[in-house]
Amino acid sequence: MKALTVQPGQAGSARLEDVPEPPESDGPVVVETLAIGVCGTDAEIVGGRYGWPPPGRERLVIGHESLGRVVQAPDGGPVKTGDLAVGIVRRPDPVPCPSCAAGEWDFCRNGQYTERGIKQHDGYCSERYRIHPDFLVPVPTELGPLGVLLEPTSVVAKAWEEVERIGNRAHWEPRCAVVTGAGPIGLLAALIGVQKGLEVHVLDRVTSGPKPQLVADLGAHYHTGSIADMGVSADAVIECTGVGQLVFDAMEHTAPGGVVCLTGVSSGGRQLAVDAGLLNRSMVLENEAVVGSVNANRRHYQAGADALARADRSWLERLVSRRVPLEQWAQALERSDDDVKVVIELGSP
Ligand code: BGC
């Protein structure tokens, strides 16, 4: 079968190639892949800056944002032939650590987890894959092709859960949220913020293209410039860029008791001058919290599916700015300013 593979660590090594059928050790359910979303993590992997191949191999099948149709499943199980479904990305570590043992692999404590399409386990950008039903999430039929947005939505559903749990450590009535970055993660974070009844402000660099209108159509406010220029006092900040300056700006411009959630996986190598003492003092005196958040466990996929089901379908459709057939995968990896979410298509629901 055809699969999009890459040699992690080596830039420009992506290619479409024939690979063996998926191994039975991956699970009893066979899924035909319909679509794969491309994200910043894929760009990092394809650029040779992130990603790990399976043990004993040089190449990794990429693709962790997926939508597929079940074509073979054990009788009486939680999924059946014909179901639309999304594969969970992370697998618990084999020890397992206490978090993985409790189904919270997103909080793996020993780093020995694997991630499909990212870390030591083939991803979903192949014509078929196998999976255990515990790691397959059914997609509401009415979402159809938009189910490909479930994985990134699960990541922001987790970020919001973190923010709320930390915010609620004391009496908390959040009113205003800032989201930095109007890419798919930022827009989905803004969607959930609006669904929670918050006044949401989104900051990005671009002044043209679809992003400003997508934000406005959510009922949120679009800004360019710096966080200081926005003139808002955020009870919650979801930082979705990983840009060091924005991370520190977010920490400086949070309302007393506010929570900053960092979701961007940045590369190192840039240094910033920071008045650490002043920042420390304001964070202490105002009870502020900063938390990093990665990945998602099963309850976050469920929360993500609920958020997508409540969202305006036509707005979600506009998030998918380009659909590219598998044979033209290289075009999907090129980014243009007007792109929001680019999807590689292998079939149709
Ligand atoms: C994925 C997560 C993953 C993270 C780090 C993100 O792009 O959505 O599932 O945990 O990268 O590898």
Image (cartoon, helix red, strand yellow):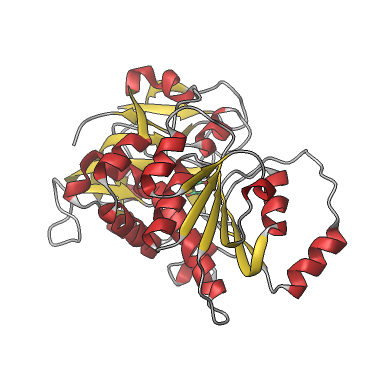
140 versus 13 height, above or below: below
98 versus 78 height, above or below: below
**At which x and y percent is residue 53?**
53, 38
Numbered marks: total: 0
**Who's the residue at 84% across and 59% down the image?**
276
Q: Nearer the viewer, residue 94 or 13?
A: 13
Describe residue 36's horizontal placement relative to residue 181 as left or right: left
User: Which quadrant does the C terminus fall into?
Assistant: top left
Q: Nearer the viewer, residue 264 or 20?
A: 264
198 versus 165 height, above or below: above
**Who's the residue at 40% across and 57% down the image?**
194
**At which x and y percent is residue 118?**
50, 42
Describe residue 245's horizontal placement relative to residue 87 as left or right: right
User: Residue placed farthest to the front in the image?
Assistant: 231
**At which x and y percent is residue 299?**
37, 65
**Who's the residue at 47% across and 66% down the image?**
161
**At which x and y percent is residue 69?**
21, 42
**Who's the residue at 68% across and 69% down the image?**
288
Q: Work out whether residue 323 can be spotted.
A: yes
Describe residue 311's horizontal placement relative to residue 55 as left or right: left
Q: Work out whether residue 62 can be spotted.
A: no
297 versus 213 height, above or below: below
User: Which quadrant does the N terminus fall into?
Assistant: top left
